Amino acid sequence: MATLTIRNLDERTKAQLRVQAARHGRSMEEEARTILRTAIESSQAEVQVERLGSRIHAHFAELGGLELDLPERSSSPAAAEFEPR
């Protein structure tokens, strides 16, 4: 495992980390690892969603956009029939 040193961490932040770690029943180190892991996983998920939407938008923008002609509904949908044939 790698070691990470965080310099110039103010005392207030350190105290808040200590309290939060105690609340979760973890050491300060484990709490910091959990916070970092959660933040990175969350930001990666957001990037992937943005990329998908951006790709879809770019694809249709190249084609001049997309307008769908939807037919008007004139009747209610038919009920499903479950009789053997």
Image (cartoon, grey):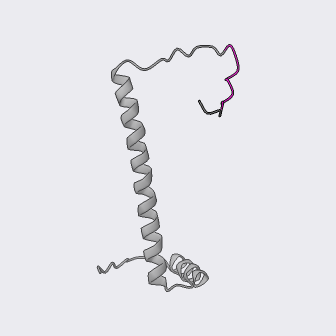
Q: Nearer the viewer, residue 7 or 69?
A: 69
Tell me where residue 36 sits by quadrant. bottom left
Q: Is residue 39 magenta?
A: no
Q: Nearer the viewer, residue 66 or 29?
A: 66
| Residue at 57%, 85% in the rendered image | 25
Which residue appears farthest toward the front when viewing the image?
Answer: 85
| Residue at 61%, 33% in the rendered image | 84
User: Looking at the figure, which quarter contains the C terminus?
Assistant: top right
Q: Nearer the viewer, residue 22 or 72?
A: 72
Q: Magenta stretch?
A: 74-81
User: Looking at the figure, which quarter contains the N terminus?
Assistant: bottom left
Which residue appears farthest toward the left when viewing the image?
Answer: 2
Q: Nearer the viewer, residue 76 or 42?
A: 76
Tell me where residue 20 sits by quadrant. bottom right
Image position of 1 with respect to 71: above or below:
below
| Residue at 33%, 78% in the rendered image | 4
| Residue at 43%, 76% in the rendered image | 33
Tell me where residue 7 sits by quadrant. bottom left
Q: Residue 69: horizontal and vertical position, in percent?
A: 52, 14
Image position of 52 with respect to 28: above or below:
above
Q: Residue 17: horizontal and vertical position, in percent?
A: 53, 78
